Amino acid sequence: MSLQIGIVGLPNVGKSTLFNALLKKQQAESANYPFCTIEPNTGTVAVPDPRLEKLAQMEGSAKLIPAAIEFVDIAGLVRGASRGEGLGNQFLSHIRETDAILHLLRHFEDENIIRAEGSGSHPKEDREIIEMELILADLESVEKRIDKQKSGLKSGNKEAQAAVALLEKIKEALQAGRLANTVKLEGDEEEPFRAMQLLTSKPVMYGVNLSEEEVAGADLDKIKGEIGLKPTDVLVPFCARVEAELIDFDGAERQEMLEAMGLKEPSINTLIRNAYTLLGLITYFTVGPKEARAWPIPVGCSAPRAAGEIHTDFEKGFIRAEVTAFKDFVELGGQKGAKEAGRLKVCGKDYIMQDGDICNFLFHV
């Protein structure tokens, strides 16, 4: 399963610096001028999960394979991107290809790091610039779709009528300055809505790039208010410069640096886990002497489909799954202890996987 989250924001907010920190290497060029990034950089990032380490320790696994997601470092948008400013059409198409958005905002001042022309004077204004450009691009797309359906409307085509009704609903929201993902959908509208791949229909989380002095004690509620976010919006504070510096440290030195800043772990760990959840993913595990592995699957995934992540034959020939919850596995000393305690479940094709399930699949070819 390969799902992508696009890193979006104005130029010089720290996108490429953060991207390099996520990958723990200098893959994307990071420089103090706008449009340092033109073509998107894509990288696979491991999802930090202490449960996997615990399972590997219990079973003596020789190898650990974490779940992973893809981040895409997209060039900075500017005011007027929806009209093609700053190669805006090209950059907007890169966003369209992703499954979710990480919207980065700069919340510090540094005279050595220039603000791009067209940036706002405050993070709230910067957020509004980006969101308005995405809204305007979506509005143009929706209006074109409505025009294409006009012939069907004249002939009384019911599918065209339903399509236009949905498009008009979306258009009204966009014209009011609201994102498409705020539109209330009826049951039969969800599939065609997803098929439109509108920029503002994607799930969004926010990252706020703070100074080194502010990041440890960041008041998220206060920052959300300053940026104009809802209390329910996901916001992760970080200092891109510090996260990039941590690339060069390992073990005790890294931990010492974190503790000096008042942090328990790198901020990007929190960001990665939130991105994983934003993409609608949960994790199940397989574990044994050779390897302990975390498998990303969508929320609501059935047992056969989860088995298919290992191999298509597992899904085609699925018989049953032996499932143990992570908590039971740890507390009862593994699968054998869970089975003896009656906590190992034998599940059929209709079983819906839960986050943290430890599985053994039985199948025939």
Image (cartoon, grey):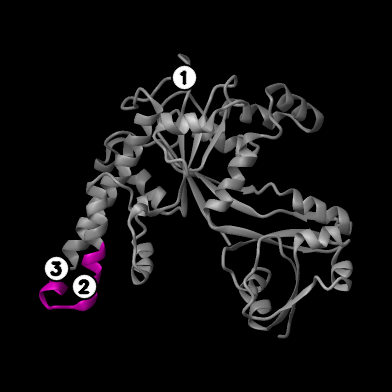
Task: Rate crowding at label 1 as few (under 14), some (14 to 19) or many (20 or more) other CA atoms within 10 Å.
Answer: few
- From the viewer's perspective, is residue 55 above or below residue 226? below
78 and 186: which is toward the camera: 186
Residue bearing the label numbered 1:
113
Residue bearing the label numbered 3:
150
Residue, x 42% and y 29% (percent of image)? 226
Tell me the magenta residue range.
151-166
Give me the C-alpha separation between circle 1 and circle 2: 51 Å
Magenta region includes residue 134? no
Task: Rate crowding at label 3 as few (under 14), some (14 to 19) or many (20 or more) other CA atoms within 10 Å.
Answer: some
Tell me which amino acid carries mark 2.
Ala
Q: Is residue 352 visible?
A: yes
Residue bearing the label numbered 2:
160
User: Which disc number belongs to residue 321?
Assistant: none
Magenta region includes residue 163? yes
The C terminus - image quarter: bottom right
